[in-house]
Image (cartoon, helix red, strand yellow):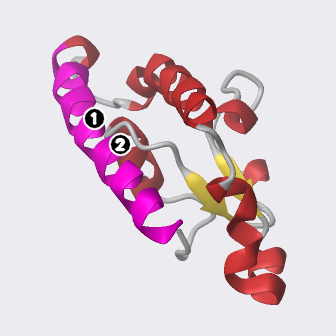
């Protein structure tokens, strides 16, 4: 998600909706919050912008080749960490609604993956 700052609220909105982020960037790892606590490499999928620029859609091969189990493992870890990003909300009440929304997002991702493959 490109913007005028290294990170964007859209990343966290997507995570709170239960979507495993696929981040296209060469440098964002240095700007993600709480890097020593949050296991970003186990939650998000990183694709280098340089590879996308040079290889196009082929740069996303590791995304398409991930198994359902790999996506589920990332999703479970994401659900553990998502409440940490609910700034200013009661995480217990809000997160249950976001989990429902996230399941809808996961169904849409599954449909998208099936249509592309």
Q: Is residue 33 magenta?
A: no
Q: Is residue 37 above or below residue 31?
A: above
Occupied quadrant, residue 66: top right
Residue found at x 53% / y 65%: 117
Q: Residues within 10 Å of mark 1 (few under 14, many from 20)?
A: some
Residue found at x 49% / y 30%: 75
Residue found at x 74% / y 76%: 58
> Which percent across, then down, holds residue 107?
30, 44
> Which percent across, then down, holds residue 33?
63, 39
Q: CA distance from mark 2 to mark 1?
A: 5 Å
Q: Secondary structure at mark 2?
A: helix
> Is residue 39 found left or right of 30 in the rendered image?
left
Occupied quadrant, residue 104: top left
Asked if residue 28 can be seen in this view, the reply is no
Q: Is residue 99 magenta?
A: yes
> Is residue 83 found left or right of 91 in the rendered image?
right
- The magenta segment is 93-117
Q: Is residue 4 above or below residue 88?
A: below
Principal secondary structure, stretch drawn in magenta:
helix
> Which percent across, then down, holds residue 91?
27, 18
Residue named by callout 1: 103
> Is residue 7 found left or right of 101 in the rendered image?
right
Q: Which mark is residue 106?
A: 2
> Which percent across, then down, holds residue 60?
69, 67
Q: Secondary structure at mark 1?
A: helix
Q: Nearer the viewer, residue 80 or 4?
A: 80
Q: Are marks 2 and 1 in contact (CB under 8 Å)?
A: yes
């Amino acid at each position: 998600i490109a913007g005028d700052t290294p990170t964007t609220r859209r990343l966290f909105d997507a995570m709170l909706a239960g979507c495993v982020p696929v981040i296209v960037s060469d440098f964002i790892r240095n700007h993600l919050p709480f890097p020593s606590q949050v296991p970003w490499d186990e939650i998000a999928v990183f694709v280098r912008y340089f590879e996308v620029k040079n290889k196009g859609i082929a740069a996303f091969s590791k995304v398409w080749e991930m198994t359902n189990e790999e996506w589920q493992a990332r999703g479970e870890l994401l659900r553990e960490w998502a409440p940490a990003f609910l700034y200013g909300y009661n995480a217990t009440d809000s997160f249950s609604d976001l989990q429902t929304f996230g399941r809808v997002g996961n169904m849409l991702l599954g449909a998208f993956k099936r249509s592309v493959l």
